[in-house]
Image: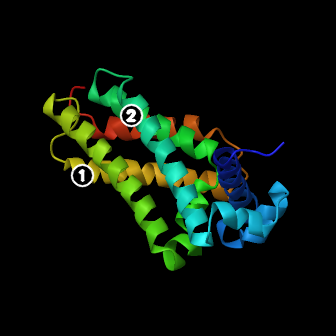
Amino acid sequence: MRKSAELRKAEIVATVLDLADRIGPDRVTTGAVASQIGVTQAALFRHFPTKAALWQAVAEHVAEGLATAWEDALRLGDTPIVRLRALISAQFAQIAATPALPMLLFSRELNVTNAKLRATFHGRLTTFHGLLAMEVGAGQNIGALRGDIAANDAAALLTSLVQGVAIRWALGARDFDLRAEGLRLFDAQCRLLAAEGE
């Protein structure tokens, strides 16, 4: 039975992400994707006319997942610290669910050959940073977080925490629970950012 165009596109995107995780984003070819799915390259190009279009669909899929996770996270708490923790937790959950994500950010495909792909990921990272800065600012406004550190700087520290733990996990044997380790370090970072007496 033939799959609908939307189901086939979703399968292709999932296959690209799986291959990117297993062999690295820069080694993913349209031939490898087609072979993995069991179709011809011509069939693949009926859904995505170029390799760049395929990678853009992958980026949009990942971006949508991140945006949804962040929206859900922001609804989980009634205080800035709880929402910050939920955002960080959601980010780690998305990375664990899409293990190719850290390597995509450092791939040649993203950083050299595909400006649109780079712009999509940069936009998502900028949005995440903005959400963190907003919650840090809210935490500062209620006296839960130190006010002597700019909210944008604190957000940069938290973003760096996520990226550092994710890279350590991705480059290693994935021998630790990404979310648990990330939240442990987030809690330590929050203690450093806490206002005196908190």
Give the quarter of the image for residue 70: top left
Mark 2 crowdedness (10 Å alpha carbons): few <14, some 14-19, many ≥20? few
Q: Taking 15 as reference, is 62 left or right?
A: left
Residue in the picture at 76% in, 69% down: 42
What amino acid is labelled 1 in the image? Asn
Residue at image mark 1: 152
The front one of 165 and 121 is: 121
| Marks 2/1: CA–CA distance | 20 Å
Residue in the picture at 68% in, 67% down: 45
Res 193 seen here: yes
The secondary structure type at the circle numbered 2 is: helix
Residue 193 position in % (x across, y down): 28, 40
Residue in the picture at 48% in, 36% down: 90
Q: Taking 82 as reference, is 104 left or right?
A: right
The front one of 175 and 194 is: 175
Res 85 seen here: no
User: Which circle marks residue 77 in the picture?
Assistant: none
Residue at image mark 2: 71
The front one of 154 and 198 is: 154
What amino acid is labelled 2 in the image? Glu
Q: Quadrant of the C terminus?
A: top left
